[in-house]
Image (cartoon, rainbow, N blue to C red):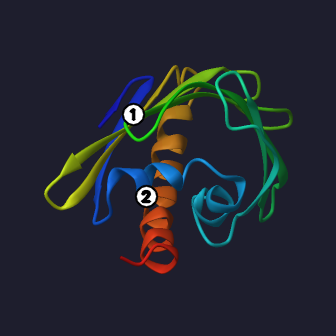
């Protein structure tokens, strides 16, 4: 769902909630999948996974150069909820706009239903950009789980 300044995405993964949650909880894991596509390389520059801990990611985007994303972890409740702030830095066109991501992990018979809600996407075109970015990242998360977390 894409509704103005909010997007909501859901996916079901064939892994228990703890395993899916853990893909968000280490720099090594998140570096493997948090990117909209294989052409955009993301490296973790900082990752302090604790409430009020910060993170910094650097995305190398073809024909655009490097884009920096920063934020803070606001809520960590393994394996059910994770929330964090999300803010692009200059020269990104959405630099300085603080948005918020909430990821919820629900145990279902198939494994885990993940619900991702990204709010405060108030810049022009920001919701469409992040909808595409999160969809690509969640596809890459599915691949990460299949390759690195075999049952």
Q: Position of residue 138 (x, y in %)?
A: 45, 57
Picture coordinates of residue 26, whole percent (x, y) = 66, 52
- Compare marks 1 and 2 and give the one earlier in the sequence: 1
**Does 11 sit left or right of 28 as displayed?**
left
Residue 30's spot in the image, x, y percent? 63, 56
Give the quadrant of residue 74: top right
Residue 15, picture quadrant = bottom left
Q: Residue at x 24, y 59 (%)?
A: 111
- Residue at image mark 1: 7
Question: In this rendering, would 112 be left or right of 91?
Answer: left
Number of marks drawn? 2
**Disc 1 from disc 2: Cα separation:** 24 Å
Residue 119 appears left or right of 26? left
Any part of residue 144 in sight:
yes
Residue at the far left in the pictured view: 109
In the rendered view, does 146 fall on the left or right side of 36?
A: left
Task: Name the residue that disc number 2 marks.
Answer: 19
Identify the element where label 2 is drawn.
Answer: helix
Query: Which of the two residues, 49 or 128, is positioned nearer the viewer here?
Result: 49
Q: Residues within 10 Å of mark 1 (few under 14, many from 20)?
A: many
Callout 1–callout 2 Cβ contact below 8 Å: no
In the displayed structure, would residue 100 be above or below residue 63? above
Q: Which of 3 and 86 is in front in this view?
A: 86
Quarter placement of the N terminus: top left
Residue in view at x 57 percent, y 59 percent: 36
Residue count near mark 2 (Cα–Cα under 10 Å), binned few <14, some 14–19, many ≥20: some
Secondary structure type for disc 1 = strand
Q: Residue at x 70, y 64 (%)?
A: 40
- Work out whether residue 125 can be spotted: no
On screen, residue 135 above or below 54:
below
Q: Which of 138 and 93 is in front in this view?
A: 138
């Amino acid at each position: 769902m894409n509704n103005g300044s909010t997007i909501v995405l859901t996916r079901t993964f064939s892994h228990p909630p703890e395993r899916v949650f853990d893909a968000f909880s280490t720099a090594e894991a998140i570096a493997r999948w948090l990117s909209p596509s294989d052409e955009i390389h993301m490296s973790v520059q900082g990752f302090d996974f604790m409430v009020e801990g910060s993170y910094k990611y650097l995305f190398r985007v073809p024909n655009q150069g490097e884009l920096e994303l920063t934020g803070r972890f606001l809520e960590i409740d393994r394996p059910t909820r994770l929330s964090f702030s999300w803010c692009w830095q200059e020269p990104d066109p959405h630099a300085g706009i603080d948005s918020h991501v909430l990821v919820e992990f629900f145990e279902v018979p198939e494994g885990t239903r993940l619900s991702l809600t990204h709010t405060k996407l108030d810049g022009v075109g920001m919701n469409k950009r992040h909808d595409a970015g999160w969809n690509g990242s969640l596809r890459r998360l599915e691949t990460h789980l299949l390759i690195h977390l075999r049952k």
